Image (cartoon, coloured by chain):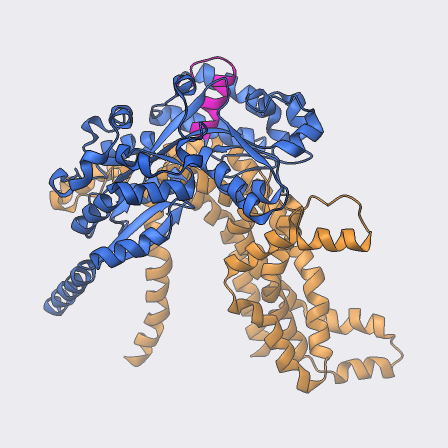
C-alpha cells in the first residue's frame, strides 16, 4: 500500500502540473476566437450533459494549426529561436566550462565559497538582473563610458537592443545552470587517473582531452539541455535586451495572446513549441538515466 | 469529504470577502498619477489602496477578457473600452454614488460618448494626443535648424529617419496608434479599416523601420530625458514628463512636444469597474475621489496630461492649462482625430502587419 502511494505521488504531480494544463491549452488551441470572457468558443457546458459534451467536441477543429502553416512568420520564429538557443548554449558552455573546471581544481576549502558565488545571483530577482544589464549596455551606459574612458572606442557602441545584448543576457542568466552540472561531474572525477596519465608520459593538455573531457561529458550534456530547453521559449530577455529584429517564438506567442487577443492561435503556437521541445527533453531524460545507471 | 471541501470553500470565500471590505485594487497606466493622491485616498476613506501599473492596453484587455482580474478599477483607452464593454467586461456605474459627477467636462464627455454611450460604464481620467517628442538640440545638429519637428515627415520620410537613427528613434509599440499615424501622413483617413489602406501604411512604416531603435511604449520617457534617443512618436504627457525630468536633472537636454500638422490621434483613458470587481463600492469611492476637482488638478499638474474635469481647470498650473501641447487651442483641436476598434479579422491583419514592420518577417 505504501509503495503504491509512493509511486502515485510523482504521477499525480505530473498529472496536476503538466498533463492537466496541457489538456486545457490543447483544448483552447482547437477552439475559435470570440469576443467574450474568456475570449474563445465553445465553452464546455457540463450542465447540458452528454449532448453538451458532444456538441462541444463537434465544434473543435484544427483550423488554428492550419493557420500556423500558412504564414511564414511562425516557422521562421521557431527556426530563429532554435538558432539563438543553439548559439547561446554553445557560448554558455564556452564560458561555463572553464569556470566549472577552475572550481573543481581549486583547493578543497575554497570550493563551498566558489559554489556560493555561482548561486549568489539567484538571490536577486531575475527581472532586476536583466534590467541591470540595460543600464550597463545602454548607449550612455556603464560599459560604454568605461570603454570611452579607456579610449578603446571613440563613439559609444550600440549593444542594447541587438542580438548581441540578447546573447549576453542569456549567457549571464543561464550560466549557473551550465556550471553546476559540469562542476558536479568534475568534482566526482578520480584525480589519480590524471596522475597515472602523467606518469605514463601524457602531456597535461592531452590528459585533459583523453580523461577529463570524456569524464565530464555527462555534466556538459546535462548543462547544455538545462540551458537550451528554457532558452527556446525565452521571452523576458529578448523583449528587454533585444531589438525589434530579434525574432523569437516567445515574442510571437505574446503578440498572439495580447495584441490579437487570439487565445486559440496562441495556444496552438504553444502546443507546437512543446512538440518541438519534446525531442530534446526526451534526450535529456535518457542522458540522466544513463548517468544514473553508470553510477548505479 | 465533500462536506469538508464545502466548508473549506465557504471559509475561503468568507475570508476573501472580509479582506475586500477594506481594500480597493486599482490598475492604471505607469507614470500616470501623483502618488501623494494614493495616500490621501487611504487617509480620507480608510480603505487600503493597492495600486498596480501597466503600459499597454493589450495587457489590460487580456486580463479583462480572462476574467477575475481581481481589480476594482481599471483604465482602458477609448477603443479598447468599447470592445471590452461589448464583451461584457464592465459593470454600469452607479451614478448616485458619484457625487462629484457635476465636475466633469461636457466637451470631453461628448467625445467619449462615442466609445461608451451615455458614459454609462466609465468616467474620463485623462486624455491626450499622440505626437512627436523631439530633442531639439540633437535634431537641429543633424537636420539643421529648419528640421520639420512638427510634421510626421520628421520620421516617416526615410531620408530624415536614416539621418536621425544616429541619435535614436523610438516609436510606440501600439499598432492601433502607429498605423493611423502613417495613414494621416499619407493624407488618408486615419480611422480606415480598409486592408488596402493598411497596406499603404505598412509601406511607409516598413521603409523607416530599419532606422527605429525600438518599438516600446514606456522606455522613451527615460530615453528622451537622458538624451539616449532624440525622437519619439509617443504620448503627449509622457514627452512632457521627460522634458520635466531632463529639466530637473539639468543635463542640457531640451525637449519639445508637437501634435503633427498632418493630424494627431486624440485618445481618452477611461476609468471603469470590472463586472467581477471584488469591491465595487470602494471602486465607486475611488472614482468619486478622482472626480474631485482638487485631486484631478493635482494629478494633471503632476503628469502633464489634460483631464476631463472642468472644475479642476482653475486649479491647474499655468504650464499645464496654458500649454497648447496639453490643452490644445481651437485650431489644433480641429486637427485631432479619433479611431474606432478594428473588427477581429482586420485586427489580425493589423497585428500581423505590425509584426512584419517591426521584425521584417
Q: Which residues are magenta?
A: B175-193
The spot of residue A187 in percent (x, y) is 66, 79
Q: Is residue B184 above or below residue A101?
A: above
Among the chains, which one is blue? B
Among the chains, which one is orange? A
- Give me the residue at 55% from left, 21% from top: B151
- Side of A274 where A78 appears, left or right: right
Can the viewer see residue B268 in this picture?
yes
Q: Is residue A231 above or below residue B130?
A: below
Please tell me how many numbered marks the rendered image carries. Answer: 0
Can the viewer see residue B66 in this picture?
no
> Which residue occupies the foreground of this view, B160 or A271?
B160
- Give me the residue at 54% from left, 55% from top: A229
**Quadrant location, the C terminus of chain B:** top right
The spot of residue A127 in percent (x, y) is 51, 57
Whether B177 is among the magenta residues is yes
- Give me the residue at 69% from left, 43% from top: A158
Whether B234 is among the magenta residues is no
The spot of residue B63 in percent (x, y) is 32, 45
The spot of residue A221 in percent (x, y) is 62, 63
Amino acid at each position: 500500500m505504501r509503495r503504491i502511494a509512493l509511486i502515485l505521488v510523482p504521477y499525480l504531480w505530473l498529472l496536476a502540473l503538466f498533463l492537466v494544463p496541457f489538456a486545457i491549452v490543447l483544448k483552447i488551441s482547437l477552439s475559435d476566437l470570440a469576443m467574450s470572457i474568456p475570449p474563445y468558443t465553445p465553452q464546455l457546458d457540463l450542465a447540458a450533459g452528454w449532448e453538451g459534451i458532444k456538441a462541444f467536441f463537434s465544434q473543435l477543429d484544427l483550423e488554428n494549426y492550419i493557420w500556423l502553416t500558412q504564414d511564414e512568420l511562425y516557422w521562421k520564429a521557431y527556426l530563429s529561436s532554435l538558432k539563438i538557443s543553439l548559439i547561446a548554449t554553445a557560448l554558455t558552455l564556452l564560458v561555463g566550462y572553464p569556470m566549472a573546471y577552475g572550481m573543481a581544481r581549486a583547493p578543497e576549502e575554497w570550493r563551498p565559497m566558489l559554489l556560493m558565488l555561482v548561486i549568489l545571483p539567484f538571490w536577486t530577482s531575475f527581472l532586476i538582473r536583466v534590467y541591470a544589464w540595460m543600464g550597463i549596455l545602454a548607449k550612455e551606459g556603464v560599459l560604454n563610458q568605461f570603454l570611452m574612458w579607456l579610449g578603446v572606442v571613440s563613439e559609444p557602441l550600440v549593444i542594447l537592443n541587438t542580438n548581441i545584448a540578447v546573447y549576453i543576457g542569456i549567457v549571464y542568466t543561464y550560466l549557473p545552470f551550465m556550471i553546476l552540472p559540469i562542476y558536479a561531474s568534475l568534482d566526482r572525477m578520480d584525480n589519480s587517473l590524471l596522475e597515472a596519465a602523467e606518469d605514463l608520459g601524457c602531456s597535461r593538455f592531452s590528459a585533459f582531452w583523453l580523461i577529463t573531457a570524456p569524464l565530464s561529458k555527462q555534466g556538459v550534456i546535462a548543462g547544455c539541455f538545462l540551458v537550451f530547453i528554457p532558452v527556446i521559449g525565452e521571452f523576458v530577455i529578448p523583449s528587454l535586451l533585444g531589438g525589434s529584429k530579434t525574432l523569437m517564438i516567445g515574442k510571437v506567442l505574446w503578440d498572439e495572446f495580447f495584441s490579437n487577443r487570439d487565445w486559440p492561435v496562441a495556444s496552438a503556437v504553444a502546443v507546437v513549441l512543446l512538440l518541438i521541445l519534446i525531442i530534446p527533453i526526451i534526450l535529456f531524460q535518457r542522458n540522466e538515466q544513463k548517468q544514473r545507471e553508470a553510477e548505479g | 469529504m465533500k462536506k469538508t471541501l464545502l466548508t473549506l470553500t465557504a471559509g475561503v470565500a468568507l475570508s476573501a470577502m472580509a479582506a475586500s471590505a477594506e481594500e480597493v485594487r486599482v490598475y492604471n497606466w505607469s507614470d500616470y498619477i501623483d502618488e501623494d493622491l494614493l495616500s490621501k485616498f487611504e487617509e480620507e476613506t480608510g480603505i487600503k489602496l493597492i495600486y498596480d501599473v501597466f503600459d499597454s492596453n493589450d495587457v489590460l484587455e487580456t486580463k479583462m477578457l480572462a476574467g477575475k482580474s481581481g481589480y476594482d478599477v481599471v483604465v482602458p483607452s477609448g477603443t479598447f473600452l468599447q470592445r471590452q464593454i461589448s464583451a461584457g467586461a464592465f459593470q454600469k456605474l452607479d451614478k448616485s454614488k458619484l457625487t462629484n459627477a457635476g465636475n466633469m467636462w461636457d466637451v470631453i464627455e461628448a467625445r467619449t460618448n462615442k466609445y461608451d454611450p451615455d458614459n454609462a460604464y466609465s468616467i474620463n481620467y485623462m486624455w491626450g494626443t499622440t505626437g512627436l517628442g523631439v530633442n531639439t538640440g540633437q535634431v537641429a545638429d543633424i537636420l539643421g535648424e529648419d528640421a520639420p519637428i512638427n510634421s510626421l515627415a520628421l520620421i516617416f520620410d526615410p531620408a530624415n529617419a536614416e539621418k536621425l537613427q544616429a541619435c535614436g528613434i523610438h516609436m510606440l509599440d501600439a499598432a492601433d496608434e502607429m498605423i493611423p499615424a502613417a495613414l494621416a501622413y499619407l493624407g488618408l483617413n486615419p480611422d480606415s479599416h480598409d486592408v488596402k489602406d493598411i497596406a499603404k501604411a505598412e509601406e511607409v512604416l516598413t521603409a523607416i523601420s530599419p532606422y527605429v531603435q525600438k518599438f516600446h511604449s514606456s522606455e522613451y520617457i527615460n530615453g528622451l530625458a537622458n538624451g539616449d534617443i532624440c525622437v519619439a512618436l509617443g504620448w503627449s504627457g509622457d514627452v512632457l514628463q521627460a522634458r520635466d525630468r531632463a529639466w530637473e536633472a539639468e543635463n542640457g537636454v531640451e525637449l519639445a512636444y508637437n501634435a503633427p500638422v498632418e493630424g494627431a490621434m486624440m485618445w481618452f483613458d477611461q476609468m471603469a469597474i470590472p463586472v467581477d470587481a471584488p469591491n465595487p463600492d470602494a471602486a465607486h469611492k475611488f472614482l468619486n475621489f478622482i472626480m474631485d476637482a482638487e485631486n484631478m488638478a493635482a494629478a494633471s499638474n503632476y503628469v502633464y496630461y489634460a483631464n476631463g474635469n472642468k472644475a479642476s481647470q482653475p486649479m491647474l498650473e499655468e504650464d499645464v492649462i496654458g500649454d497648447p501641447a496639453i490643452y490644445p487651442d481651437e485650431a489644433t483641436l480641429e486637427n485631432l482625430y479619433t479611431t474606432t476598434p478594428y473588427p477581429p479579422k482586420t485586427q489580425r491583419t493589423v497585428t500581423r502587419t505590425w509584426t512584419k514592420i517591426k521584425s521584417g518577417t
